[in-house]
Structure formats: structure tokens, C-alpha cells
């Protein structure tokens, strides 16, 4: 168990460009979450997958954002036509549904995006 | 609107000076209160989950407690390596996404 991994760790892009981030969850976890965190704030929920199904999207997830988890393993988050307001840390978390009580979400190291 | 509020925003302690961080919540039907530690430039690291009022959990110099309206993270005799931002969160949404507070930034000086 190597934990949740994310790639790249840092991304600098120009406004208007498209970017794609990857998340590899803990291998036995079937739930995967994407969050966004800006400076001085806690993480904010973007979207959630159970296996390959995308079950919930936040209103923060504009139509420029799309997420996939094609085989129920790794996930990608794409941002099209980036804007300066997209600059943030993008965090991925994974979990395994607990029996009875809610499960714990384990976070990756994040991808820091800077849009110039 | 359900929300979680953390206080103070920042806390500076001398090494060995014990203190507490507060997390107050207004959500009804709490399904779990979580504490995470976050170092600069890194993802949150899970610390504790509390489910019911009166519950307590400990890990090294940290102890988390839960009442019906708030949770405390007690830090006993902190060391400089305890310096980090501490986040609390609860389960919101129908699918279990976490709702986070803004965090408390803790600095422990030697």
C-alpha cells in the first residue's frame, strides 16, 4: 500500500490552455473524490466516483471541468480553457466503504496548479 | 446552512505549552467528525474520526474530543514538529463528501 498518488505535483500553464491531472487511489479503495483547495481555505468538494460511476458533482464543477474514472481504478480531472481563478491545489482522496460507520478518506499529495 | 467553524485561525505556542483547538458545527445528524493535519504544500493527513458525543481518541500528544456541538483537539506539551494546519471536517452531501473548516494554523517555537 503506497497511498494515494497524484501526477503531476506542480503545473504551470497559460490562461486558455487545457490541463489534465491524474490520481491513483489506494488499490483496494472503490470510492474516489476530487477536492480543490485555495490558500487559507479548507478543501472543497468537486466530484465523487464509486467504481467507474460518477455519482455526484459540486456546483463548483463548471462545464470546463470534466472527470473520468474509466476502469474504476485511476481517475483524471481535466480543466479546459483554464482561467486564473482555477489556480489552486487539486486534491484526490480515496476510501473503502466502512461497515456501519462512515469510512475514512485518505488524501494524496495534491497537484498545485498555477494559471498565468 | 450546515457549516463548520474552526478557532482560532492561528495559534503560536512555545514548545511544551499545551493548548486546544476548537471546531464547532451546526449540522444536524452528525455522521462523523474528522480531524486532519496538513503540512505546507501537502495533502491532508488523517488523524481521528469521532462519531458520538463523549467519544475521545488519542495519538501521541494529540487528543480529540466530541460534544453535541463542537470538537476539541487538545495538544499536550507540543513540539516544533507539531507545527501544521489542523483541519476538521464532517460528512456532508448524500454520497459522503467531506465539508471542511478553514483550519487552525499551529506554530510551535522551540
Image (tube, helix red, strand yellow):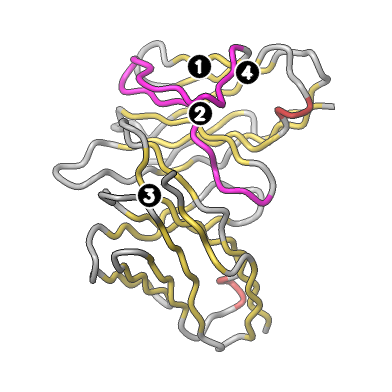
Marks 1 and 4 on same chain = yes
Residue, disc 4: A20
User: Between marks 3 and 2, how big is the CA–CA gap?
Assistant: 16 Å
Q: Are marks 3 and 1 in contact (CB under 8 Å)?
A: no
Which callout, 2 or 1, points at the residue further toward the start of the chain? Answer: 2
Q: Position of residue B60 (x, y in %)?
A: 39, 75
Q: Splitting the image into 4 quarters, where does residue B40 fall?
A: bottom right
Instruction: Pick the residue in front: A3 or B57.
Output: B57
Residues drawn in magenta = A40-63
Name the residue: 51% across, 53% down: B101
Instruction: Pick the residue in front: A27 or A107.
Output: A107
Residue, disc 1: A67
Q: Are marks 4 and 2 in contact (CB under 8 Å)?
A: no
Name the residue: 54% across, 43% down: A43
User: Between marks 1 and 4, how big is the CA–CA gap?
Assistant: 9 Å
Decide: is B76 above or below B60.
Answer: below
Amino acid at each position: 500500500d503506497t497511498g494515494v498518488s497524484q501526477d503531476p505535483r506542480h503545473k504551470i500553464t497559460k490562461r486558455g490552455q487545457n490541463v489534465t491531472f491524474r490520481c491513483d487511489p489506494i488499490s483496494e479503495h472503490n470510492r474516489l473524490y476530487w477536492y480543490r483547495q485555495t490558500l487559507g481555505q479548507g478543501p472543497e468538494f468537486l466530484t465523487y466516483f464509486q467504481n467507474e460511476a460518477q455519482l455526484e458533482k459540486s456546483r463548483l464543477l463548471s462545464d470546463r471541468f470534466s472527470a473520468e474514472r474509466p476502469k474504476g481504478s485511476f481517475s483524471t480531472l481535466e480543466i479546459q480553457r483554464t482561467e486564473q481563478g482555477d489556480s489552486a491545489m487539486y486534491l484526490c482522496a480515496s476510501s473503502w466503504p466502512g461497515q456501519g460507520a462512515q469510512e475514512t478518506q485518505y488524501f494524496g499529495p495534491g497537484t498545485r496548479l498555477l494559471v498565468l | 446552512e450546515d457549516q463548520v467553524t474552526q478557532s482560532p485561525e492561528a495559534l503560536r505556542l512555545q514548545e511544551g505549552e499545551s493548548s486546544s483547538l476548537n471546531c464547532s458545527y451546526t449540522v444536524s445528524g452528525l455522521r462523523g467528525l474528522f480531524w486532519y493535519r496538513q503540512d505546507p504544500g501537502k495533502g491532508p493527513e488523517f488523524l481521528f474520526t469521532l462519531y458520538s458525543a463523549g467519544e475521545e481518541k488519542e495519538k501521541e500528544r494529540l487528543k480529540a474530543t466530541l460534544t453535541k456541538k463542537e470538537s476539541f483537539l487538545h495538544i499536550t506539551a507540543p513540539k516544533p514538529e507539531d507545527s501544521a494546519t489542523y483541519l476538521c471536517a464532517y460528512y456532508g452531501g448524500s454520497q459522503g463528501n467531506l465539508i471542511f473548516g478553514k483550519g487552525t494554523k499551529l506554530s510551535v517555537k522551540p
